[in-house]
Amino acid sequence: MSDGPILRVRDLKKYFEISSLLGRTRAFVKAVDGVSFEIGDKEVFSLIGESGSGKTTTGRLILRLIEPTSGSINFMGKEIVGMAEEEMRRMRKDMQIIFQDPYASLNPRMRIGDAVAEPLIVSGLANEEEAKERAIEMLDRVGLIPGKEMAQRLPHNLSGGQRQRVAIARAMITRPKFIVADEAVSMLDMSIKASIVSLLESFRREVGLSMLFITHDISIAKLISDRVAIMYLGKIVEMGPMRRIIESPAHPYTKALLEAVPSVMRRKREKTIELKGEMPDPRNPPSGCRFSNRCPFANERCHREEPALVEIERGHFVSCHFPLPPASH
Ligand SMILES: Nc1ncnc2c1ncn2[C@@H]1O[C@H](COP(=O)(O)OP(=O)(O)O)[C@@H](O)[C@H]1O
Ligand SMILES: [Mg+2]
């Protein structure tokens, strides 16, 4: 493969039609509303945002679990929007997902060895016997040791952290080039989160995995991300290298998110941004900048005119009429 990005998403949109109150007009939730980003080879790119900002929908669109309203998704040099199911099936072994809830994503009656072997058999990459052998190796690899014994267990005999290791084993068994991890550690105890993140990190290092890491938790994203995008009501409001975003957030929303988790900031600073109110109803977002009704700095222009996402320093993008001044490097 060339050195180009493994994934290139352009102006991706997903509008869900919902029943309106009176049933007379058509109403939409603009869950993802014109999102563009790229993920490089072996890169971990995080989508961060509050619940309802459109992260999961973005991940599901990229895996073509749902169809976009419009936009382009290029994976390993091929456009996958509109790709025929037959060809898509072949692509799927290269793109896998790890969900938030390991309890819901595993079949309670299937032994974990079979659960891990299943994707290999389904995609025709191995026969049953080979698949079982490789599943045992993979269980060892993800720390479920000894794999041979663990393979015989049912999910209810495992802890939450162990189940998430099974989910990772299932995702990695087809040797994908890319995975979407959607809140993959959010439900786990704090002490286990870091060990699961470092397991994912080890796959990146050893097999050159690229990852879309979805989380509402910036302190977890910090552990693994090269670059991040901050989402708010279906749009990316800021994007750039993880370190630079922490050091010098340009969007007031990003700064407010960071100030909510003081442990992430290197220098302890006083809270300077107080968010007003709640996330607006996504069916009826504010005009102009979508953040304007919660932003302490918003003026008349912000309520009227939607800001474009512009590059303010190399690789660092923000969508705000009045970005915060950059901190020195
Ligand atoms: N199938 C659906 N039908 C209608 N609305 C949906 C559907 N899926 C998601 N949404 C809405 O889209 C918005 C974004 O949701 P989601 O992508 O799950 O956000 P996040 O993962 O950031 O919490 C929310 O307002 C949510 O209610
Ligand atoms: Mg979600």
Image (cartoon, rainbow, N blue to C red):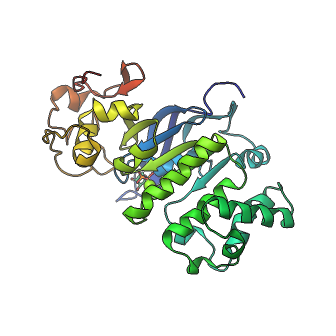
In the image: residue 190, left or right of residue 102: left
Quarter where residue 300 is shown: top left
Q: Quadrant of residue 81?
A: top right
Estimate the x, y position of residue 112 in percent, counting from the top left. Answer: 67, 72
- The number of numbered discs placed on residues in the rendered structure image is 0
Name the side, left or right, on which 247 lies relative to 162.
Answer: left
Horizontal side of residue 168 vs 231, given as left or right: right
Give 318 or 129, whichever is nearer the viewer. 129
The structure residue drawn at horizontal position 64% and vertical position 56%, both measured from the top left corner, is 171
| Image location of residue 324, percent across then percent down | 22, 26
Front residue of this view, candidates 296 and 188: 188
Snapshot quadrant of residue 83: top right
Residue 254 showing in the rendered view? yes
Q: In which quarter of the image is the C terminus?
A: top left
> Outermost residue toward the front?
146
Classify the position of ligand 2 by quadrant: top left, top right, bottom left or bottom right: bottom left
Q: In which quarter of the image is the N terminus?
A: top right
Residue 299: x and y, percent?
Answer: 15, 29
Vertical placement of 30 versus 322: above or below?
A: below
Q: Is the residue 195 above or below the residue 35 in the image?
A: below
Kindly identify the residue that appears in the image at 59 percent across and 36 percent down: 42
Give coordinates of residue 293: x percent, y percent: 20, 41
- Is residue 58 at least partly visible in the picture? no
Q: Which residue is drawn at 27% across and 36% down?
A: 287
Residue under the point 68% across and 34% down: 76
Vertical position of residue 276 compared to residue 21: above or below: above
